[in-house]
Amino acid sequence: MNNLSILLKSKHALYGWIFPRFVQSLRDNCHPDNARWGDINDLCVKIEKIIVQSQALDTQFFLDKQKLFHSILDIDFDEQEDKVITALDWQNFPHKTAAFLVHGNHQFGQFPLVTRLLQLQELKNGERREIFVKLSNLKNIDCVWEEVARRFVHGNQPTGLSPEQIKEKIFQALQSQNLIFIFYEVYQSDRLSFLDELIQDFWQPIVEKANHKETYLVMFLIDNKGGVCKSGVSLAEEVNHPKYPKIPLSLPPSTQFPRTKIASWLRVAVRDKVVPESLCVDILLTDSQEGVPELVYERICQYCNTSWERELAHKLIQVF
């Protein structure tokens, strides 16, 4: 009895909770003829049932979070998704290559939009490598090459590789897997020439020499300030632009979710028991500054008793 509280509260990093193993050990070391063996065995069986039920609940909770994650990605961004699918299907270029500018006047869901686009079947088929690069951390195009090289060398240490050597590693990877470059914080009003350099001196040389056939080579530029479209950086408005995909295709700007989109999603989510029936459009709009995507997601998670910060935010906003 003196050790009972320790046994109940202790958990081994490898073997789990101590108390079930302690009871199991008591039963295994108690002779069946002992008068207490039956009581110990009954306790052991009860504990085993509790463990099985607990594991089933944990699994269901995990599945529910996965269901919620995939569901809230469907709220809107239909226009952007359609344009990306069109670009991926429209291959006037000898290889499966695409580049996109994801942008908006405010930070309205650009990262979750990219996360949704990464779920497209075209980009999920086969192996995939995603290379996230925070552009505001880098001083010049040489730093971009080095940062990318770190993603292709084990240990993420300085590589000292030349751009030509890095391109060869990219071309080798493309033979067996999709490569998706995701550059974020791309708009810096005092360094707009840097973005032009990224397109001309990093992206275009790769596109011109890549010789992949079955895999996709894709670049996303994420602008959370809405300045790139007004900066004079070369962009394509449609996939039939003569320079696309050597220059990025500008997607429709991300904005607040409209009431009609939230209402349409909510009807399906309630029907499929993803969210409770008590959740309504007015609540979501009121608590999300009239449809700011990240705030909509957060409010939905609160209603579903799921932690936005710990459970889903890091999945929807992958680079944070």
Image (cartoon, rainbow, N blue to C red):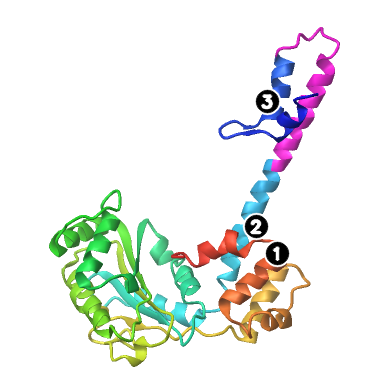
Task: Look at the image and tell me in which quarter the N terminus lies.
Answer: top right
Query: Real-space Cα distance between discs 2 and 1?
Result: 9 Å
Mark 3 and mark 1: Cα distance apart in space:
34 Å
Amino acid type, residue under disc 2 in the picture? Asp
Q: Quadrant of residue 204?
A: bottom left
Q: Which residue is mark 2?
A: 64
Q: Earlier in the sequence, mark 2 or mark 3?
A: 3
61, 87: nearer the viewer: 61
Q: Are marks 2 and 1 in contact (CB under 8 Å)?
A: yes
What is the span of residues highlighted in magenta in the rendered image?
29-54
- Residue that numbered label 1 is attached to: 304
Task: Tell me if I can see residue 207 in this picture.
Answer: no
- Find numbered disc 2 in the image and state the secondary structure of the residue it sits on: helix
Q: Position of residue 318 (x, y in %)?
A: 46, 64
Q: Which mark is residue 7?
A: none
- The earlier-in-sequence mark between 2 and 1 is 2
Residue carrying label 3: 21
Question: Badge 1 local density, few (<14 within 10 Å), some, or many (20+)?
Answer: some
